Each structure stands twice: as C-alpha cells, then as structure tokens.
Image: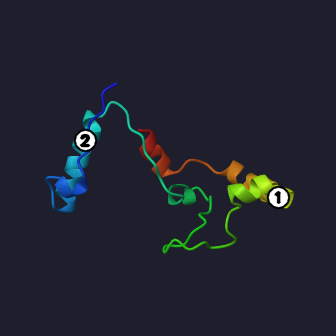
Amino acid sequence: MSAVPAQPLENAPAADGERLAEHLAGLLARARSLFVITGAGCSTGSGIPDYRDRDGSWKGSQPIRFQDFIRHESARRRYWLRSFAGWPHVQRALPNGTHAALAR
C-alpha cells in the first residue's frame, strides 16, 4: 500500500478556503485509504455527549485515570457504575451525517 504524503498546511498551494478545499479534495482523490482521527464532537450529532467545553475544560467530573483504576477498587467500581449507567444512551445512538461522510 502506498501512501500519499500529506503536505503541511503552511506549504499548501492555497491561501483561501476554496482553493484549500480543492487541494484537500485532490489529496483525498489520490489516496487509496484514509485514516481519520476525530474529536468527541463528531458524535454529538448522534446524541452522545462530549465531555469538554470549547476551551477544553471538563464539563463534569473528570474521567478516571488509568493509575487510579489499577490501584483502587473504588475507582474501578465508579468506572463500571458510570459505564453501566451511560450505556443505554450510547447504545441507542445512530450514525449521523458526519459518520456517513467519513465512511464514503
């Protein structure tokens, strides 16, 4: 599998949004496969909440850290309780337009 080398944005041949979009479309058209990393906002349209605000601050309680999960039974219980309580909401979520666009 050969990869299309991505150009850094500062080296992109376009300065305006339309030309940059055309450049990106060209890169995507030549790519044989694509790997996309998204943030939590990708799934908010499906009703799955994000955990940070626009400034990156936690909206509610912070997630359980790996070290705490490993060291403390109480942290594991809290983790699994929160996961159990939130699962029905996540299970009902359906893919949204962003997911469909990424799948194309």
Give the residue number, with chain letter if any, for mark 1.
Answer: 72
**Relative to the observer, which residue lies in front, 19 or 4?**
4
Coloring scheme of the render?
A: rainbow
- Helix, strand or loop under label 1: loop
Q: Is residue 11 left or right of residue 85?
A: left
Residue 83 seen from this side: no
Relative to 13, does residue 51 appear above or below in the rendering? below
Say the numbered circle drawn on residue 58: none
Q: Nearer the viewer, mark 2 or mark 1?
A: 1
Q: Is residue 104 left or right of residue 94?
A: left
Q: Tell me what residue is drawn at x 38 percent, y 38 percent.
A: 34
Where in the figure is residue 70, as x and y percent of width and height? 76, 52
Relative to 64, does residue 55 appear above or below in the rendering? below
Q: Residue furthest top?
A: 1
Q: CA distance from mark 2 to mark 1?
A: 48 Å
Give the residue number, with chain letter if any, for mark 2.
Answer: 27
Q: Tell me what residue is drawn at x 15 percent, y 61 percent.
A: 15
**2 or 1: tag closer to the N-terminus:** 2
